[in-house]
Amino acid sequence: NAGVTQTPKFQVLKTGQSMTLQCAQDMNHNSMYWYRQDPGMGLRLIYYSASEGTTDKGEVPNGYNVSRLNKREFSLRLESAAPSQTSVYFCASSEARPDRDGYTFGSGTRLTVV
Amino acid sequence: GEDVEQSLFLSVREGDSSVINCTYTDSSSTYLYWYKQEPGAGLQLLTYIFSNMDMKQDQRLTVLLNKKDKHLSLRIADTQTGDSAIYFCAERGTGANNLFFGTGTRLTVIP
């Protein structure tokens, strides 16, 4: 009953470095999401994937790319990290149309870009 | 697009009731949710309410929905220090596949 697993939990990058945040879910959910959380700004949607093989931009996609590798996995890539991307990143998953179960969230990746 | 608003901070004394408020703009919202985020953790679903309901109670939690005013509230009875967290409301509109989240309310419980 792992739910949504994110790796790594913490990461420090230098400006310009690249990295990939990993997310996997074991609930057979169709939809997966990447959010960033910044103080006073709540959750902002970066990208989402309504189903395997599809991805769409959210509210703040610039500077990020995603890959829906299969039904279980949805990765977020920063090609050239910037200090403005310092944030906490959350992955979530849900049924194709969220109902009473809403989204299930991972525990987050805390990223610092120096 | 949808707009979900919450006040940022709330402080209450241990044992008192807490009321966290949320307003939303999508009149076609079907499901509305409350999530809790403890320090250093992800968001956990606390409860939901379907749009044809006015109230839902679950132990110490009471959710009130006023569709006319597009207002959602979460009441926590007998608030404990373990209730200190950030609380997010979220809504899903008819036909929508995504949830829209508020900014979160940081609840601080004073012993």
Image (tube, rainbow, N blue to C red):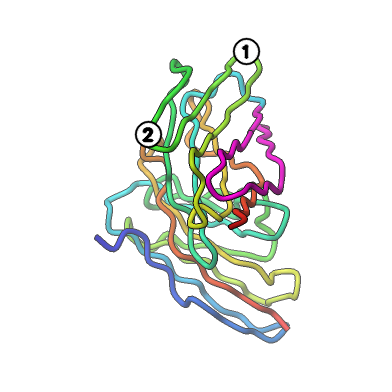
| Residue B72 seen in the figure | yes
Q: Is residue B6 magenta?
A: yes
Mark 1 vs mark 2: give the one in front.
2
Amino acid carrying label 2: it is: Asp
Quarter in which the C terminus of chain A is drawn: bottom right
Specify the amino acid type for callout 1. Answer: Lys
Magenta part of the chain: B1-24
- Above/below status of A87 relative to B51: below
- Alpha-carbon neighbours of circle 1 within 10 Å: few (<14), some, or many (≥20)? few
What x and y, as percent, mark residue A76? 52, 66
Q: Secondary structure at mark 2?
A: strand
Q: Position of residue A15 (x, y in %)?
A: 73, 83
Label 2 crowd bin: few (<14), some (14–19), many (20+), radius 10 Å = few
Residue at 35 percent of width and 46 percent of height: A30
Label 1: which secondary element: loop
Q: Nearer the viewer, residue B8 or A106?
A: B8
Residue marked by disc 2: B58
- Does residue A72 lie above or below B74 as drawn? below
In the rendered structure, does residue A84 fall within the stretch colored magenta? no
Q: Is residue B95 above or below residue B103?
A: above
Return the chain for callout 1: B
Query: Mark 1 to mark 2: distance in Å?
Result: 23 Å
Closest to the observer, B82 or B90: B82
Q: Position of residue B110 (x, y in %)?
A: 62, 56
The residue carrying mark 1 is: B68
Q: Residue at horizontal 65%, vertical 56%?
A: A61
